[in-house]
Image (cartoon, rainbow, N blue to C red):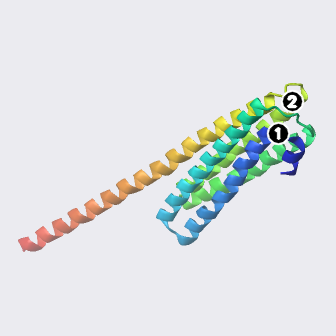
């Protein structure tokens, strides 16, 4: 946040807004796992998707505002360093979440891990923004902010599909299991009546 205040980079702001949203999504996911509830996990997955979407909308607003009302960027080295730190932090988070998601067979956690990995590359967009502005193209920062927004919207769509597909798959599996149990009971009842 200090680097954003000193640099005024909308690309960094988009990354910060999104990463703050990501941090908040850990709370419902953690609660779902503590409760060991598939339903709570599904709803936490929906919360993750909603949070990602909200961060994209805020980032888009800020980038458009900056295109309309440009501001000079300062402290470009600090801006680039913040992007590198964001990349490293997101990559570490991605590895932990993906490993845990595979181990726990959790689509919500896997989606969150893949999302964190993409976020690392989004953070590298902040480094690109610093480089482009240093080369003299001030509009590059809000344009990169818009590109980051597009990536966040893609992440939103992918996360929605992952959470939704898991929900549909589990519903189908539950229906199949109920049908199999019902058929087994009917078969058993017919067998009892025959004797």
User: Could one spot residue 91 in this view of the protein?
Assistant: no
Is residue 193 rendered to the left or right of residue 74?
A: left
- Pick the front one: 131 or 184: 131
- Write down the residue under mark 2: 133
Instruction: Decide which of 58, 46 is in the foreground and name it.
Output: 58
Q: Give the Cα separation between the discs numbered 1 and 2.
A: 10 Å
Q: Residue 173's spot in the image, x, y percent?
A: 36, 56
Instruction: Label 1, secondary structure: give it.
Output: loop
The residue tagged with tag 2: helix, strand or loop? helix
Residue 83 can be seen, yes or no = yes
Upstream in sequence: badge 1 or badge 2:
1
At a point 92% along the width and 38% down the height, the residue shown is 74
Q: Nearer the viewer, residue 86 or 98?
A: 86
Q: Residues within 10 Å of mark 2 (few under 14, many from 20)?
A: some
Q: Does residue 149 appear left or right of residue 171 in this picture?
A: right
Query: Where 175 sits versus 70, above or below?
Result: below
Q: Name the residue: 84% across, 46% down.
A: 4
Report whether 114 appears left or right of 14: left
| C-beta proximity under 8 Å, tags 1 and 2 | yes
> Residue 161's x, y, as percent?
50, 45
Residue occupied by mark 1: 9
Reply above or below: 123 against 70: below
| Image-quadrant location for residue 129 | top right
Quarter of the figure that contains the C terminus: bottom left
Residue beneath the point at 87% across and 40% down: 80
Q: Position of residue 72 (x, y in %)?
A: 88, 34
């Amino acid at each position: 946040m200090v680097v954003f205040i000193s640099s005024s980079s909308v690309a960094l702001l988009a990354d910060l807004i999104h990463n703050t949203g990501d941090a908040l999504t850990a709370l419902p996911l953690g609660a779902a796992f503590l409760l060991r509830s598939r339903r709570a996990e599904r709803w936490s997955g929906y919360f993750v998707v909603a949070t990602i979407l909200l961060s994209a909308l805020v980032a888009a607003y800020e980038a458009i505002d900056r295109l309309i009302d440009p501001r000079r960027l300062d402290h470009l080295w600090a801006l680039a360093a913040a992007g590198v730190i964001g990349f490293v932090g997101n990559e570490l988070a991605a590895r932990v979440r993906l490993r845990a998601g595979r181990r726990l067979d959790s689509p919500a956690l896997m989606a969150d891990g893949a999302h964190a990995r993409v976020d690392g590359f989004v953070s590298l967009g902040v480094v690109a923004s610093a480089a482009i502005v240093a080369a003299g193209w001030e509009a590059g920062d809000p344009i990169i902010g818009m590109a980051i927004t597009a990536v966040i919207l893609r992440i939103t769509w992918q996360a929605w599909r992952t959470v939704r597909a898991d929900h549909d798959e589990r519903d189908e599996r539950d229906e199949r299991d109920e049908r199999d149990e019902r058929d087994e009971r009917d078969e058993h009842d017919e067998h009892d009546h025959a004797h």
